[in-house]
Image: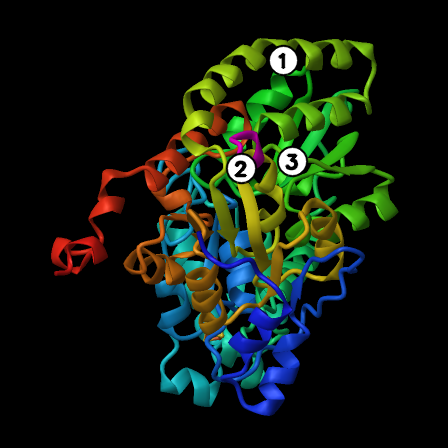
Amino acid sequence: MGEKPNASMVEEILSVYPEKAKKLRAKHIVVKEEGSTCAIKSNIKCIPGLMTARGCAYAGAKGVVWGPLRDMIHISHGPVGCGYYSWGGRRNLTSGKLGVETFSLMQFTSDFSEGDIVYGGDKKLAKVLKEAKELFPTVQGFSICSECPVGLIGDDIESVARNMTKELELPIVPVRCEGFRGISQSLGHHIANDAVRDHLLGKRERPEEVGPYDVSLIGDYNIGGDVWASKKILEEMGLRVRNVWTGDGTTEGMMAAHQVKLNLIHCYRSMNYICRHMEETYGIPWLEFNFFGPSKIKESIRKIAAQFDETIQQKGEEVIAKYDPLMQKVLDQYRPRLEGKRVMLYVGGLRPRHTIGAYEDLGMEVVGTGYEFAHKDDYDRTFPQMKEGTVIYDDATEHELDEFVNRIRPDLVGSGIKEKYVFEKMGVPFRQMHSWDYSGPYHGYDGFPIFARDMDMAINSPARGLTQAPWKKDKEVR
Ligand code: SF4
């Protein structure tokens, strides 16, 4: 059992930094105590050289929002690196035949060379668009995801997109998501949302009337099939999911997304912008929900059903009644193996709070959590969920994470690939909470049994008892 987080622990951990960095970082870490408020600094640029886990606006726009749209080609516009490193790295699954109905798993880049920096890349971009349309005639549209140099050399991708939209008769969306903009992935989400608003949304009308139960599923990127698990619940409730933003989503779905009755948003951080816009412009209300773990799913089903008539409310109760016994079975199997285990999380902009309920369903306790790129409104939603004595960290550096984990010694850490092997070597069980460690889905009733199994597998693996050589174990030292 490790130490309990407190203010002096935080001070000690930060003491290795130069004075200025120490002062700045202190504002990003809070230990929840009686009467303490959520006064944590967030959405501020990181301090150079401290090994942030953050990414850039391109990662937020291309990697998160645009990339999962399956029937568009997303061009990584600039040198080869950003597209190459983000190629297939995020597990946003799509349906359809690769290269015909879905292009998400492919990497398209304009592969800038020095000449493009000197003379500009606009001509090359037009050529790339034409070539891609020729080679993949079934493509439904393009996004042009700008990498750093594009904004610096003064290229006019908007005008290329305008001209090529006419020539190719396809929506072509310029996205100004150069990595130097903003301070994390977060601005990339916002830029991507605005690009959807300006270039896709409302541009197509479906022939049929909007049905009373038509909804959009917003901010679910189908990691390991999450969208499919969530959609299943909504459809069993009697709702009609007209489109998903953007996991396994389609261009047409995005264009006609103004024709629904309600927007259901899972990832608030990445898509609240477009929900607010649709509310202001089309009067579509939106609702946050949480499909991690049976308690939150049940709560969410009732919250969603309450927006509709008795038919849906009745069906919602039927869905709960159908899955309750199945969930109980999962709890009976895994809860005794996980009860009382302590977890520390460090993820992006939603899961550090949204997965807490699922851990608690299994009798586990989240003793530390934090976000790479959350804003104040995310922390406002997180703070009330945390118990006293929990440590909350914003844009944590690798040094801080190492120290926290080493001192608190949780039974499980849930974070990203950059953290995984550090903690595995420290002997602390680890689950990737971005990629689901190549497992999933974790959303919905289909996801929870997998989530429970995976956490059990990590914590109770027999390998855990073998991390120290027998001759180094205290009791065996003679
Ligand atoms: S910061 Fe710039 S160069 Fe780096 S990944 Fe982002 S867009 Fe690419």
**Amino acid tagged 1:** Val
Residue where numbered disc 1 is placed: 319
**Crowd tier of the residue under label 2, counting other residues whose Cα lies within 10 Å: few below 14, some 14–19, many 20 or above:** many
In this view, the residue in front, 435 or 201, is: 435
Q: Is mark 2 within 8 Å of ligand 1?
A: no
Q: Earlier in the sequence, mark 3 or mark 1?
A: 3
Q: Residue at x 67, y 22 (%)?
A: 240
192 over 16 or under it: above or below: above
Q: Earlier in the sequence, mark 1 or mark 2?
A: 1
Q: Name the colour scheme.
A: rainbow
**Mark 3 to mark 2: distance in Å?**
13 Å
| Residue 378 falls left or right of residue 394 | right
Q: Earlier in the sequence, mark 3 or mark 2?
A: 3
The magenta span reads 359-363
Residue where numbered disc 2 is placed: 359
Q: Which quadrant of the view contains residue 399?
A: bottom left
Residue 331 at x, y percent in the picture: 49, 22
**Mark 1 to mark 2: distance in Å?**
22 Å
Which type of secondary structure does the marked residue at label 2 adopt? Answer: helix
Query: From where the camera sits, is residue 424 visible?
Result: yes
Report the residue that reaches farthest toward the front. Answer: 478
Residues at circles 3 and 1 in contact by the CB criterion of under 8 Å: no
**Crowd tier of the residue under label 1, counting other residues whose Cα lies within 10 Å: few below 14, some 14–19, many 20 or above:** some
| Residue 148 falls left or right of residue 41 | left
**Amino acid tagged 3:** Asn
Q: Nearer the viewer, mark 3 or mark 2?
A: 2
**Amino acid tagged 2:** Tyr
Which numbered dot is residue 290?
Answer: 3
Residues at circles 1 and 2 in contact by the CB criterion of under 8 Å: no
